[in-house]
Amino acid sequence: MTFEINIKDKSLKFISSLQKHDRARLKEAMLALKEDPVPIKSLDITKLKSEKNKYRIRKGKFRIVYEVIWEQKVILIHRVDFRGNAYK
């Protein structure tokens, strides 16, 4: 069961501004979502309380906030940012 990953433009811009090793870590985490949209065992993932299908991945000082659209098999990456800015 493979999911399609869509990333919002603002998140792409943030990722492209990072150093190469940080980009690689984030890319690895996002690609893991293709096969298993909620890989709780392999990544530090928590469901966001106020949202139905939104989750966050904690990767060091970065946070990835994403939504799983189960019917369409799509993962929508809403926000990739530093820890302090990701939830604003």
Image: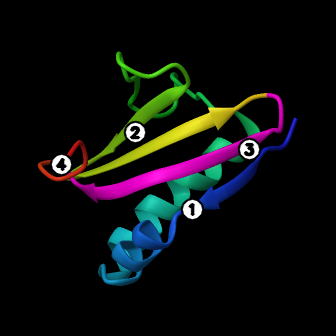
- Tag count in the figure? 4
Q: Earlier in the sequence, mark 4 or mark 3?
A: 3
Q: Earlier in the sequence, mark 1 or mark 2?
A: 1
Amino acid at the residue labelled 3? Val
Q: Which mark is residue 57?
A: 2
Numbered label attached to residue 74? 3
Q: Residues within 10 Å of mark 4 (few under 14, many from 20)?
A: some
Most extreme residue toward the left is 84
Q: Nearer the viewer, mark 1 or mark 2?
A: 1
Check contact, mark 4 vs mark 3: CB within 8 A. no
Alpha carbon distance from label 3 to label 1: 11 Å
Q: Quadrant of residue 2?
A: top right
| Residue plotted at (75% across, 28% down) | 70
Q: Position of residue 21 (x, y in %)?
A: 36, 74
Q: Earlier in the sequence, mark 4 or mark 1?
A: 1
Amino acid carrying mark 2 in the image: Ile
At 44% from the left and 22% from the top, the residue drawn is 51
Residue 63 x %, y %: 31, 48
Q: Is residue 75 above or below residue 8?
A: above
Amino acid of disc 4:
Arg
> Is the residue under label 2 in contact with that under label 4 (CB below 8 Å)?
no
Which of these two is toward me, 76 or 28? Answer: 76
Residue at point 37%, 23% (across, down): 48
Q: Is residue 8 above or below residue 84?
A: below
- Magenta highlight on residue 31: no
Measured in 3D between alpha carbons, the distance from the residue under mark 4 to the one under mark 2, in whole angstroms, is 10 Å
Q: Which residue is mark 1?
A: 7
Q: Closest to the observer: 84 or 31? A: 84
Determine the secondary structure under disc 2: strand
* Residue at numbered disc 4: 83
What are the residue bounds of the magenta stretch? 71-82
